[in-house]
């Protein structure tokens, strides 16, 4: 059996994980539908009330916030760079 090099398997960054969730939210075309989706997600996450840095909950929060901005103005979130500041908490 060949040996697998663990160094070549990189852990996805926070940005990569947020991008993945944002891609899944892309088909949502209204804020009402986005709120319903967020409500369902948040019900599943009630057991984890604290947002740890890099956690799945944090990834979801960031992705939903970015999609909310996109739906507001029909501009990609990258155009909101001056309006969106992401602050990472220390672990």
Image (cartoon, rainbow, N blue to C red):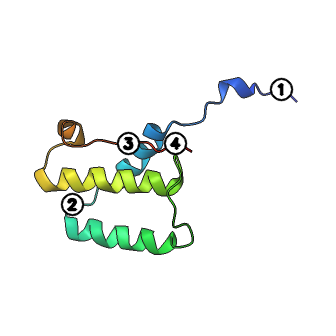
Judged left or right of residue 86, residue 48 is right
Instruction: Point out which mark residue 90 bears.
Output: 4
Q: According to the image, label 2 marks what residue?
A: 29
| Mark identifier at residue 87 | 3
Residues at marks 2 and 1 touching, judged by CB atoms closer than 8 Å: no
Question: Alpha-carbon neighbours of circle 3 within 10 Å: few (<14), some, or many (≥20)?
Answer: few
Q: Are marks 3 and 1 in contact (CB under 8 Å)?
A: no
Separation (CA) of disc 4 from disc 1: 36 Å
Q: Which mark is residue 83?
A: none
Residue at (22%, 71%) from the top-left corner? 32
6 and 64: which is toward the camera: 64
Q: Quadrant of the N terminus?
A: top right
* Screen quadrant of the C terminus: top right
| Residue drawn where x is 46% and y is 53% of the image | 58
Q: Give the secondary structure at mark 2.
A: loop
Closest to the camera, between mark 3 and mark 2, is 3
* Position in image of residue 33 (x %, y %): 26, 69
Q: Percent from the top left, x then y, of residue 66?
A: 28, 50
Q: Is residue 89 above or below residue 68?
A: above
Answer yes or no: do the residues labelled 3 and 4 have beta carbons within 8 Å? no
The numbered mark, 4 or 2, whose residue comes first in the sequence reads 2
Q: Nearer the viewer, mark 3 or mark 1?
A: 3
Distance between the alpha carbons at the discs numbered 3 and 1: 40 Å
* Tag shown at residue 3: 1
Question: Which comes before the other along the chain, label 3 or label 1?
Answer: 1
């Amino acid at each position: 059996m060949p040996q697998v090099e663990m160094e070549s398997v990189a852990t996805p960054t926070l940005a990569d994980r947020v991008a993945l969730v944002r891609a899944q939210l892309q088909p949502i075309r209204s804020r009402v539908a986005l709120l319903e989706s967020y409500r369902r997600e948040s019900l599943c996450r009630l057991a984890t009330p604290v947002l740890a840095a890099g956690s799945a909950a944090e990834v979801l929060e960031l992705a939903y916030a970015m999609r909310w901005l996109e739906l507001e103005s029909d501009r990609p979130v990258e155009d909101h760079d001056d309006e969106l500041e992401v602050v990472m908490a220390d672990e």
